Image (spheres, coloured by chain):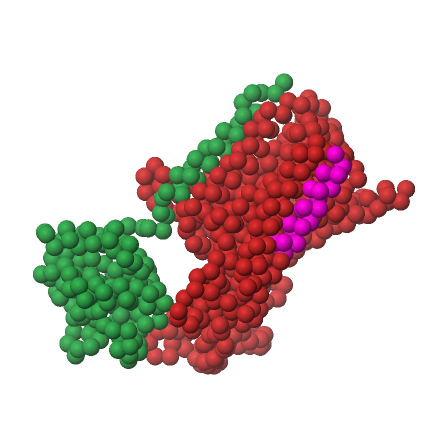
Amino acid sequence: MLNKAYVVLPLVLFLMIVILLGRGLTLHPSEIPSPLINQPAPVFELPQLLRKTMTTQNDFLGHVTLVNVWATWCYACSLEHPFLMALAHAHSVMIYGLDYKDNPYQAREWLKEHGNPYDKIAVDETGNVAIDWGVYGTPETFILDKKGRIRYKQIGAITPESWQRDMQPVVEQLQQE
Amino acid sequence: MTPELGHFAILSAFCFSLVQALAPLWGRHRPFYVQVSTRAAFLQFVCLLFAMLSLIACFLWNDMTVIYVRDHSHTSLPLLYRIGAAWGGHEGSLLLWCLILAGWTNAFVFSSPRALSRSFYQRIVMVLGGLSGGFILFLLATSNPFWQEVSQEPMVGADLTPVLQDPGLLFHPPMLYLGYVGFAIPFAFAMAALMEKKFDPTWAKACRPWIMLPWSFLSLGIVLGSWWAYRELGWGGWWFWDPVENASLLPWLSATALLHSLMVSEKRGVFKGWTILLALITFALSLIGTFLVRSGVLVSVHAFANDPARGLFLLGYLTVIIGGGFFYYGCRIQYFYRAPMFQLVSREMLLLINSVILLVAVATILLGTLYPILLDAFDAGKLSVGEPYFNTVFLPMVLLLFLLMGFAPHVHWRQQSIQAVWRHTGMSFLFSIAMGLALPYVCGFPFKGLASVGAALSSWIIVATLQYAYRHASLKHAAMIVAHLGIAVLALGVTFSKSYSEERQVKLQPGESVLLAGYEFKWITVGEIKKVNYNTIMAVFSVKKRHWPIGYLAAEERIYTSHAQVLSKPGILANPMRDLYVALGSPLEGHSWSVRLYYKPLVRWIWAGGFLLLLGGMLSCLHYVVTRQGVKHA
């Protein structure tokens, strides 16, 4: 005769899968924590976009810094840009830009048109420095503490919500340190 | 106006789906109410078709007030892709899902299988109405493609992802959906059988084309997808064990098990519960696949927008429909139990083993696909399960399956002695082993285990199947013969291209040449071309073998202007025996580029095998139609 276990087995297995999938909904698989968190910023030396001098990791020392990776060809960066401008007007934090795989001439034109929120901009034409920083794509934003260590990484555009929820508390805490 | 009309059409379709599901209950199955139900099914289809056409019209007229159009189109997008973009995103593809379900329902209603009793027929229509209603509700609640947003700025749209801008977009998703969604009909058949507590050969016979057709479309959809990935992604691979690919393979495997189990139920009246269970599982896997693709729980190349509300709704739908199905199965299954009446060596036994192997394959692939969620759920870290796992677990099962595949047609129902089977097939079996050893040598390849096993099993299936075909040449058996040959061709393509592919990554500049697998690739020229919505750098290579020119191929690096996204479009020089494949990497210093070159023997056979599967499915349906007409005239 039919075994009772055989009768309920499909339902039980199915419900287990459903529970697993339901749990999966609350997880965020694409958020891979950066191995650089709590590490000093990678060493680099790059020309600046708007000045004739070079910029290095030592420029991050002494203040809390946002390092925003952007490019003129990046659509999401142009969406993020107004918020960065607002942030720059508030003067609460230093904002550095890393112009990623871009044409410096176009980048200057773009900033003239859209406004410049950055205190300093490093030009990474080849993208080699961005590789050291573990950049997947643009935009990405790092928060560095006063000792120049990476403390937080945001993948994708900053929105007012993500700023208030995730990034602003980090910045405020680091400024206390 | 068009978006409003489309929105209204979806709402009406929802109402009609409710009528379709509830009218027979209301009218206690009186013929009038059944007719109301089938008419509602038809009107629902008309409404959904209208909605789909409205959406396409919004794309054609660049109606950027519609959020879905704004996010998936661009004023410079070519016309053909504007049509395809209608199902290139989440919302539109769900509308296509609903439309195709309504299409299948109406195909079933109009075919009106006479063999089925009226109560069976109306129960099937009812179940389909309920399925459809739930999905349209999902569409309306979370993913309405006609949502609008008025903005002050003039808009050009965010554009369709460049990877989707390929003729593949026009055919691959609709084909896959025709397969996925089509399994709703066997599901409805199974539910109707459970309600009626009855399952006879006429049921099995009426159900068969409704498994065969979606199975064929799904085969074609998978093959098209694999061909698209090969042509478009520039990685030189044709199968990546990506979660979304797995999601399409899972229902295919269980539907294959279902086809074979159904045959036993039809011919021998056993495995009834098993067949019903497989029908439920197949549709469950289709829905789980839809969930995996649509909810964003897994990382995949087919990444879609991640919205928890959508995932939650789909999961709820899945739980109600499939959980309900399995529960009902548990309650009713005792009515279908029949003591098995066959011996160890019998066709029933082989087909049972076939089902079991396919289901175990489903379970292992499902485990591999869900494993990242499982680990993440227990906070044990994030990881992805890749090719090595899938190849290791999947390959042995498939090889065993192929071994049995040659024997199965030669084994009788009920029982047969091993000696008798061996008398029929022994010579072919030995011949195939010899072929396995000889074939790589004849083709001029070195000896490799996998290739020899592949060649031996392919020739075993081919010889044994042809032997059977010689003794049973008729339309009735043609479907099985062609489909099994398709599997053999596919297996040969997979094992040979896996074993003997060669690839090189080199630094190259125009004028230089490079040697791969005896072919000399010379980079002749490079130029920049402006197209409507992208600029492309095109590199032309000439190919020679032993100083004989073979042909030219052009690899492209496309830069899509609206996205500033780069897409490498490989150049491919193909013939039935091998593909030569060149993909541009990235520019290096000076004029040189990194270039990847591949030599892939027999890779076309994989897709040829897929088309034979489709042909087999079509032949089976043709046989059904022909015999059915014969009955009608008699």
Q: Quadrant of the N terminus of chain B?
A: bottom right
Q: Nearer the viewer, residue B237 or B523?
A: B237
Q: What residue is at 69 percent from the left and 42 percent from the top?
A: B37
Colour of the chain lettered B = red
Q: Is residue B391 above or below residue B170?
A: above
Q: What residue is at 60 percent from the left and 36 percent from the top?
A: B280
Q: Is residue B617 above or below residue B375?
A: below
Q: Is residue A32 above or below residue B522?
A: above
Q: Nearer the viewer, residue B404 or A94?
A: A94
Rendering coords of residue B288 (x, y %): 51, 42
Q: Nearer the viewer, residue B184 or B155?
A: B155
Inspect the magenta stretch and tell me whether residue B40 lies in it.
yes
Q: What residue is at 49 percent from the left and 43 percent from the top?
A: B314
- Point out the residue furthest to the top here: A1
Q: Is residue A171 visible?
A: yes
Quarter of the image holding residue B420?
top right
Q: Which residues are magenta?
A: B30-49
In the picture provided, is B382 more to the left or to the right than B44? left
Colour of the chain lettered A = green
Q: What residue is at 61 percent from the left and 66 percent from the top?
A: B575
Rendering coords of residue A43 (x, y %): 18, 63
In the picture provided, is A46 more to the left or to the right than B496? left
Rendering coords of residue A111 (x, y %): 26, 75
Inspect the magenta stretch and tell me whether residue B554 lies in it.
no
Kindly report the secondary structure that dominates the magenta region of the rendered protein.
Answer: helix
Q: Is residue A43 visible?
A: no
Quarter of the image holding residue B183?
top right
In the picture provided, is B483 more to the left or to the right than B565? right
Q: Quadrant of the C terminus of chain B?
A: top right
Label count reads: 0
Rendering coords of residue B130 (x, y %): 60, 40
